[in-house]
Image: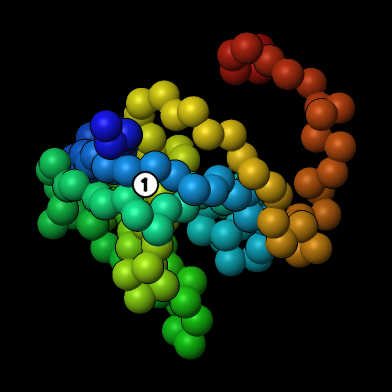
Amino acid sequence: MTQTTAGSCLCGTVRFHIAGEFESFFLCHCTRCRKDTGSAHAANLFSSTATINWLSGQDSIRTYRLPETRHEKSFCVKCGSALPGVQMDGAVVVVPAGSIDSAIDIRPNAHICVASRADWDEHLEEVSRLDGLPG
């Protein structure tokens, strides 16, 4: 039986299902992924066999490709949420982990491009943890 993973954007305009297994889950610290996410790293799932079934909002999806690279980011034009895309000339489905709504059974395989991580991205396990917003 093929695994199906549900996902959506923040505003709910774009909804999708991913049919198939994820082969890897990387936390990428490269400069491009940090710019894409505005965070310490991107969290993306990869599959060479899965397919994307767009349930709604496909006309609200745009893809930006950094010129002269293979770096791409698909996003919702209404809310800006990162969305799945087919990259590397159709060879790989890349799914931002934050866009997934259903439970997944894969854990990150590795932090990658750590040589270019942000200088403040060290010893984060020492930072206070709160269950809600700071008071």
| Identity of the residue drawn at 45% across and 38% down | 98
State the residue position of label 1.
81
Tell me which residue sits at (55%, 46%) in the image.
Answer: 25
Q: Quadrant of residue 101?
A: top left
Q: How many marks?
A: 1
Q: Is residue 65 visible?
A: yes
Q: Is residue 18 left or right of residue 65?
A: left
Q: Is 68 drawn above or below residue 11 in the view shown? A: below
Give the colouring mode of the picture.
rainbow
The x, y position of residue 73, in whole percent, is 41, 62
Q: Nearer the viewer, residue 76 or 106?
A: 106
Mark 1 residue type? Ser
Which residue is at the far front? 1
* Left or right of 10 in this view: 118: right
Q: Quadrant of residue 85?
A: bottom left
Where is residue 128 shown, x and y percent of the image? Answer: 79, 21
Q: Which part of the image, by quadrant, shows the N terminus?
A: top left
Q: Nearer the viewer, residue 2 or 9?
A: 2
Residue 108, image x and y in percent?
61, 40
Q: Residue at x 23, y 35 (%)?
A: 12
Q: Position of residue 4 (x, y in %)?
A: 28, 34
Q: Report crowding for label 1: few under 14, some 14 to 19, many 20 or more residues within 10 A (C-alpha).
A: many
Quadrant into which the C terminus falls: top right
Residue at screen point 58% across, 66% down: 32
Q: Residue furthest bottom?
A: 68
User: Does the rendering let one see residue 96?
Assistant: no
Left or right: where 4 falls relative to 117:
left
Q: Viewed as shown, does residue 37 lie left or right of 9?
A: right
Q: Label 1's element?
A: loop
